[in-house]
């Protein structure tokens, strides 16, 4: 059950990472771009941690 949960978490964070990366490519406001970059970093880190925890 734990592996399934980590699998779902990985795909959720990967989806959010890709979605935010797509949004940031069209963003012109620097403040918003900075916030979006922080979200990208968070989702990338969380996806990688999900892989590690899944083992």
Image: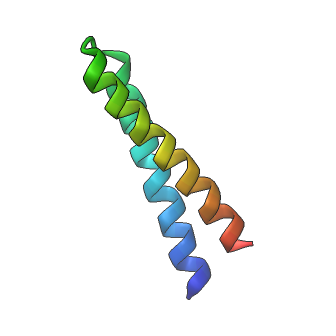
Q: How many marks overall?
A: 0
Residue 38 drawn above or below residue 52 = above
The residue lying at 26 percent from left, 25 percent from top is 32
Q: Given the current orientation, which residue lies at the most extreme bottom position?
A: 1
The quarter in which the C terminus is drawn is bottom right
**Which of 24 and 7 lies nearest the eye of the viewer?**
24
Residue 6 drawn above or below residue 29 = below
The quarter in which the N terminus is drawn is bottom right
The residue lying at 57 percent from left, 50 percent from top is 45
Percent across and percent down for residue 39 are 39, 41
Percent across and percent down for residue 7 are 56, 68
Residue 24 placement: quadrant: top left
Residue 46 drawn above or below residue 35 = below
The residue lying at 42 percent from left, 37 percent from top is 38
**Which of 17 and 34 lies nearest the eye of the viewer?**
34
The residue lying at 46 percent from left, 53 percent from top is 13
Residue 6 drawn above or below residue 11 = below
Q: How is the image coloured?
A: rainbow
**Which of 31 and 54 lies nearest the eye of the viewer?**
31
Is residue 29 rendered to the left or right of residue 50? left
**Which of 5 and 39 lies nearest the eye of the viewer?**
39
Q: Given the current orientation, which residue lies at the most extreme top position?
A: 28
Is residue 34 rendered to the left or right of residue 8? left
């Amino acid at each position: 059950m734990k592996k399934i949960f980590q699998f779902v978490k990985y795909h959720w964070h990967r989806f959010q990472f890709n979605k935010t990366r797509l949004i940031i490519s069209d963003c012109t406001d620097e403040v918003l771009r900075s916030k979006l970059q922080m979200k990208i970093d968070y989702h990338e880190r969380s996806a990688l941690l999900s892989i590690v925890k899944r083992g």
